[in-house]
Image (tube, helix red, strand yellow):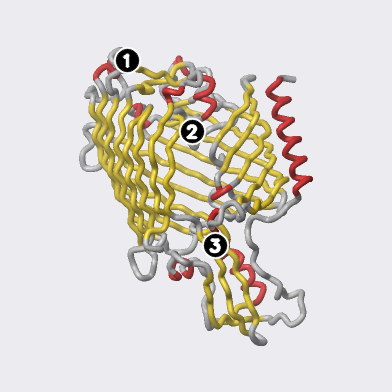
Amino acid sequence: MSIKIINFILVVLVALVLSLCLGHKSVYAQVDTSFSPANSGTPEKVKVNNIFIIGNEKTKKSIILRELDFTTDYYYDWDTFIEIIQADQKKIYNLRLFTEVEITPLLTGEDEAEVVITVKERWYILPSIIFQLADRNFAEWWTNQGRDFSRVNFGLRLSHNNVAGRNEKLRFAGQLGFTKALDIQYSKPYIDKKQKHGLAVQFTFYNNKTLAIKSENNRQVFYTSPEENVLRKNIAAAIRYTYRRSFYNFHFVTLAFNHTWINPSVLEENPNYFQHGSNTLRYLYLTYTFRHDRRDNVAYATDGELLVLSATKYGVFYTKELDEIEVNLTANKYFKINDKFHFNTGLTANWFLSETQPYTLVRGIGYNPNFIRGYELNVIEGQQLYVHKNSFRWKFFDYDFDISRTVPLDQFSTIPIRLYLSANFDHGFVKDRNEILANARLTNKYLFGYGLGIDLVGFYDAVLRFEYSLNNTGGGNFFFNFKTPF
C-alpha cells in the first residue's frame, strides 16, 4: 500500500475520532414544525394573517417576500403548508444573503397563524486578498508545473453582495502575477416592481506573458517568449438580461463583445491558434441559457435538482473571423436518503458544430467544470464531450463552533463545519473529429475514474475537497480542490 493511501486513511480516521468526541449539531436552522398534524390541536387548514421578518437590518423585506410560495388571507392544507415553508426556507438561504434562516408558524386561533421569519445576515462588504493558482487545478500546478510560484495570481478583490439591501452585487478585482487582470461586475436581480426582470453588466481586461498554446500527450503546452513579451491581451464587455417567471426557473440572454490580441510569435508556435491567419480575434456573441435550480444549497447540494441548457452563437452580424455555435447541457440530481447519507449524480455535455475552433474556445475534459476524477493532470480536448459524475456521501461530522467571545461581530460569531466521506465514480468520453495523433491516447476513448474523498463545508459555504482517485489507465494520485464537483 502506497504512503499516499496510508496518509489518506489516517486523515479519515482522525476525522472520525473528532466526530465522536465533539458530537453533532445541525448547521442550518430548521423550520419549527411543533404544530404538526401528529400533535393535538393542529388544524386541517390554516390561514396566514401576517408575516413578520426579524433580523433583516440591511436586506429589504421585498427581497425575502419574493421567495415565499404562500401569502396572507388564504387557506392552506396544514401538511402542504409545512412543505411550502420548508421549501421557502431553502430558497431564502440560497439567496446567499444570510448565514441562518428559520421560518416559524405560530397558531393564533383554530385555523389562523402568524409566520415569523428569522434571518441572520452575512457580512456583505468583503475585501479579500487574491492569492490563487493560475493553473486548472491544484494537481496541475503541483505536479505538471513543478510547484512554480511564478504561476500564482495575487491582488485585491472587493465585493458588495447586497447593495442598497436589494441583493444587488458589485464586484471589483485588480490582479497581478501570472495573469494581470481587471474585472468589474454589477448585477441587479430585479428592475421591475413584480421582481421578474433583472440586468447585469461586466467588463474584463487581462494579459499574459506565458500562454497555453496547444496540448500534446494530453497535457497543456505553455509558451513564453525569450524576451518575456506580453503574449495575449483580452478585452471583453457583456450585458445580461434575466427573466425569472417562477421560483425555480430562470432565463438569461447575454450579449457580449470579445477582442483578443496575441503576439505574432504565438502563431509561429501554433499557426492554428486563431485559424484565420491574423493575430487578432474579434467577435460578438449571443447566449441564451435556461436554468432550473431546485437545490437545497447552491454551494453544496444534498437534495434537489439542477438543469442548465445553453446555446451560444459566436459571430453575430460579423462572421469573418469567427462563425460558430456551441451547445451545453448540465443535468444534476441530488438524492437525500436521510440526514446522514445522500447520493449525487450529474451529466454534463458540450457540443461544437464546427470541425475546429480557435484555441481560446477549445473545450474538453480537464477544463472546469468538465472533469473526471483521476484525470486532473490531463486535458482531453475535442468538439464533443460527455461526463457523468457520481458521489455517495456520508456526513459524519456536523458542528457549529461558537467564537462569539473572541469575535464580537454577529456575522462571524459561529463557524459551521461539516465533513462528508465520499465514494466517487466518474466516466466520460471526448470526441475529437480531427483525431490529433499527439493526443490520441485519451481522445475518442471511454474513460473512468474512482476513489474516496473527504469534503469539508465551512464558513460562508466554503468547500474544500481532499480526494484520492484512480483512473482506468492505471494512474492514481491525491487531489485537492476548492469547489464542489457538481
Mark 3 or mark 1, earlier in chain: 3
Q: Which residue is mark 2?
A: 385
Residue drawn where x is 40% and y is 63% of the image: 166
Q: Element type at marker 2? A: strand
Mark 3 is surrounded, within 10 Å at the Cα level, by few (under 14), some (14 to 19) or many (20 or more) other residues, namely some
Mark 1 is surrounded, within 10 Å at the Cα level, by few (under 14), some (14 to 19) or many (20 or more) other residues, namely few
Q: Which residue is mark 1?
A: 269
Give the residue type at disc 1: Glu
Mark 2 is surrounded, within 10 Å at the Cα level, by few (under 14), some (14 to 19) or many (20 or more) other residues, namely many
Q: Quadrant of the N terminus?
A: top right
In this view, the residue in front, 3 or 36, is: 3
Kindly check if marks 3 and 2 are in contact, taking CB atoms under 8 A apart as contact.
no
Mark 3 or mark 2, earlier in chain: 3
Spatial CA distance of label 3 from label 2 is: 42 Å
In this view, the residue in front, 117 or 88, is: 117
Residue drawn where x is 55% and y is 42% of the image: 486
Which one is in front in this view, the residue at disc 1 or the one at disc 2? Answer: 1
Q: Which residue is mark 3?
A: 120
In this view, the residue in front, 268 or 119, is: 119
Where is residue 32 drawn, in percent x and y? 66, 69
Q: Residue furthest front?
A: 405
